[in-house]
Image (cartoon, helix red, strand yellow):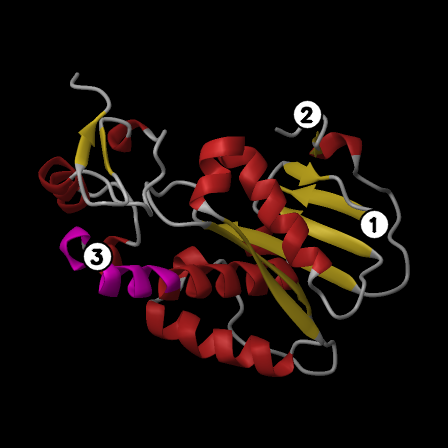
Amino acid sequence: MPSKKSFKAAEQTRFSWDPVGLMAGVDEAGRGPLAGPVVAAAVILDDGKRIRGLADSKVLTPLQRDRLYDLIREKALCCAIGEASVAEIDTLNILHATMLAMKRAVEGLRLKPVKVLVDGNRLPQWDVLAEAIIGGDAKVKSISAASILAKVHRDRLCQALDQEFPHYGFAAHKGYGTPEHLQALRQHGACRHHRRFFGPVAATFITPGGEVITLRTS
């Protein structure tokens, strides 16, 4: 398990100057759901190829996100997706797993940035300058782009999970704890894609053989 020093508070990495070179924006999707991986994206935009409509993914419609997803993949200098699995979330906890997904996204970039701008107030340890920006997905275009990539990528993963386990409704709620999802958990127990130690899931899970095992009854 990572040490408590595997990520840093934002105030420790704010700079009064920025180096000249490529800047990457980073954001995540999927910290709150009860199922599925947490996903992060890293994006380096091309200043010569403007993408209109970039915004925090949460304020965009699914159709807008899908359109922008394709434009970002087409026009950005480079971009990358990083994931942390349900097993890693259960082992590390959701905060450390999110930091791991972000680290993987940045390490997956074809070009190395001179600085990374991250939405939120926590940072993984990187061998590159980094700054955490609260509300960055609404303030910094590259972070907005990263939020869109991460959200669309994760939503598509949930649609695939829905094909495997249609009785949970993953395509509709994307793993979040909606009343419909909670009812499905009570009825069917949890499947292997559920985060075992998240509150509503901790009561039951299904073994690889399909048996419903009760972990907690109250």
Name the residue beneath numbered marker 2: 3
Q: Amino acid at mark 3?
A: Phe
Q: Earlier in the sequence, mark 3 or mark 1?
A: 1
The correct choice, above or below, for 149 with respect to 205 in the image is: below
Q: Residue furthest top?
A: 218
Q: Earlier in the sequence, mark 2 or mark 1?
A: 2
Is residue 166 highlighted in magenta? yes
Q: The residue tagged with tag 3: helix, strand or loop?
A: loop
**How crowded is the residue under tag 3: few (<14 C-alpha within 10 Å), some, or many (20+)?**
some
Q: Is residue 53 left or right of residue 24?
A: left
Taking depth in this image into account, of 16 and 179 the one nearest to the observer is: 179
Name the residue beneath numbered marker 3: 165
Q: Position of residue 12 (x, y in %)?
A: 78, 31
The correct choice, above or below, for 98 with respect to 162 in the image is: above
- Quadrant (top left/top right/bottom left/bottom right) for the N terminus: top right
Residue stretch rendered in magenta on the structure: 157-168
Q: Position of residue 9 (x, y in %)?
A: 69, 30
| Residue occupying image coordinates x 54% and y 32% | 92
Q: Position of residue 62 (x, y in %)?
A: 34, 68
**How crowded is the residue under tag 2: few (<14 C-alpha within 10 Å), some, or many (20+)?**
few
